[in-house]
Image (tube, rainbow, N blue to C red):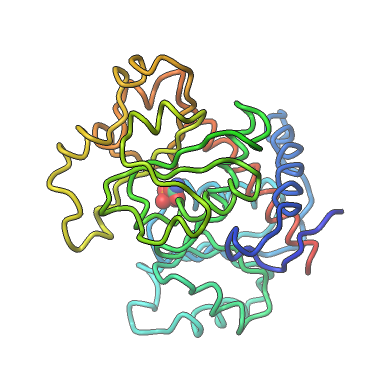
């Protein structure tokens, strides 16, 4: 069994290109498994996994749970809103109590950037980051890159633009790390107020004109405008955002070349992307969701080898 170079998946920043390739190879095998009539394998039969969600989620939470069940793990679900966190219990106390029930792996989403790094210093279980505030969302970046590869082949030398609210997006940062490790050329595109000041230092280029960005790229990963993380106004109105940065069918037709469109979800239809693009042949949004299960199976399986 191949294993990863790390015990935890805290972010794409902390894993190697070889780790990413190993995850993709295992995900390819697991994708074949989950398309069989009998979708379950016994790989994690004696492993107990806790899914700790301190922030809302639809895709990631369901996808991890399905991945765990497909691998025959025992699964324990925790959501902060219905827990003793509301009575003031700390993150460390919450997790230590759950781990005393003999949990082997922890999948966690938390609003605080770095919460997983903090936990990793205090507990023995494998930790998988399912999103930490505006920091990283590593399994999303892995499933995004894996889905891109299925359509355009090896990402080395491919032109990929990440569009939208880069400033508040953990998906953007994890995508940047992942795509650069795989040898892609990466640009970010959005209003100047939503592009972090020092992003070029990571090795990406910035393009403020959506038409130029789309003319340049093979693949566009379109991000949600994260209004819940914006305490001040970063652009005048959603209507104006749509006018300058929204991706619609007419824009793609004018550009007139095949561009693969991704979106991590949830979509603000009619804001960052119109329905006629989200539901078109350009879009691989549902393929991303399908691949999410295989990628998460691969991550869980490979990390279990570090136990
Ligand atoms: N892509 C993603 O993280 O979606 P959820 O917030 O629904 O998990």
Q: Please tell me which residue is depicted at 39% across the width and 23% down the height of the picture.
A: 279
Left or right of residue 237: residue 244:
right
Q: Quadrant of the C terminus?
A: bottom right
> Is 183 drawn above or below residue 254 in the view shown?
below
> Is 155 drawn above or below residue 87 in the view shown?
above
Determine if residue 58 is in view.
no
Determine if residue 8 is in view.
yes
> Is 209 drawn above or below residue 63 in the view shown?
above
Residue 102 in picture, x, y percent from top left: 68, 75
Looking at the picture, tell me which residue is in the foreground, 257 or 203. Answer: 203
Taking the view exactly as shown, the residue that stands out farthest to the left is: 236
Residue 187 in picture, x, y percent from top left: 46, 43
Left or right of residue 259: residue 36:
right
Q: How many marks?
A: 0
Q: Please tell me which residue is depicted at 27% across the width and 33% down the height of the picture.
A: 246
Residue 288 in picture, x, y percent from top left: 53, 36
In which quarter of the view is residue 271 placed? top left
Looking at the picture, tell me which residue is in the foreground, 9 or 60. Answer: 9
Looking at the picture, tell me which residue is in the foreground, 135 or 155. Answer: 155
Q: Please tell me which residue is depicted at 45% across the width and 55% down the height of the picture.
A: 200
Looking at the picture, tell me which residue is in the foreground, 81 or 26. Answer: 26
Left or right of residue 148: residue 36:
right
Q: Please tell me which residue is depicted at 48% across the width and 18% down the height of the picture.
A: 258
Residue 156 in picture, x, y percent from top left: 66, 37
């Amino acid at each position: 069994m191949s294993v990863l170079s790390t015990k935890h998946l805290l972010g794409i920043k902390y894993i190697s290109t070889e780790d990413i390739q190993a995850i993709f190879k295992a995900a390819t095998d697991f994708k074949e498994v989950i398309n069989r009539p009998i979708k379950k394998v016994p790989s994690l039969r004696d492993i107990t996994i806790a899914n700790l969600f301190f922030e809302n989620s639809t895709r990631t939470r369901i996808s991890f749970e399905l991945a765990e069940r497909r691998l025959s793990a025992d699964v324990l679900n925790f959501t902060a809103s219905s827990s003793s966190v509301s009575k003031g219990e700390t993150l460390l106390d919450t997790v230590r109590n759950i781990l005393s029930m003999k949990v082997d792996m922890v999948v966690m989403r938390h609003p605080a950037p770095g919460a997983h790094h903090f936990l990793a210093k205090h507990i023995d279980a494998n930790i998988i980051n399912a999103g930490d505030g505006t920091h990283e969302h590593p399994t999303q970046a892995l499933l995004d890159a894996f889905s891109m590869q299925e359509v355009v082949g090896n990402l080395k030398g491919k032109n990929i633009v990440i569009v939208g609210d880069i400033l508040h997006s953990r998906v953007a940062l994890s995508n940047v790390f992942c795509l650069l490790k795989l040898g892609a050329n990466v640009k970010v595109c959005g209003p100047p107020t939503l592009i972090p000041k020092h992003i070029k230092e990571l090795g990406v280029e910035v393009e403020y004109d959506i038409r130029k960005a789309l003319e340049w790229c093979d693949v566009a990963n379109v991000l949600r405008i994260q209004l819940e993380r914006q305490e001040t106004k970063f652009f005048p109105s959603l209507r104006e955002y749509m006018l300058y940065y929204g991706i619609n069918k007419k824009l793609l037709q004018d550009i007139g070349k095949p561009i693969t469109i991704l979106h991590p979800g949830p979509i603000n239809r009619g804001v960052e992307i119109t329905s006629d693009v989200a539901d078109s042949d350009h879009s691989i949004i549902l393929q991303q969701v399908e691949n999410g299960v295989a990628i998460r199976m691969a991550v869980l399986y490979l990390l279990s080898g570090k136990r």
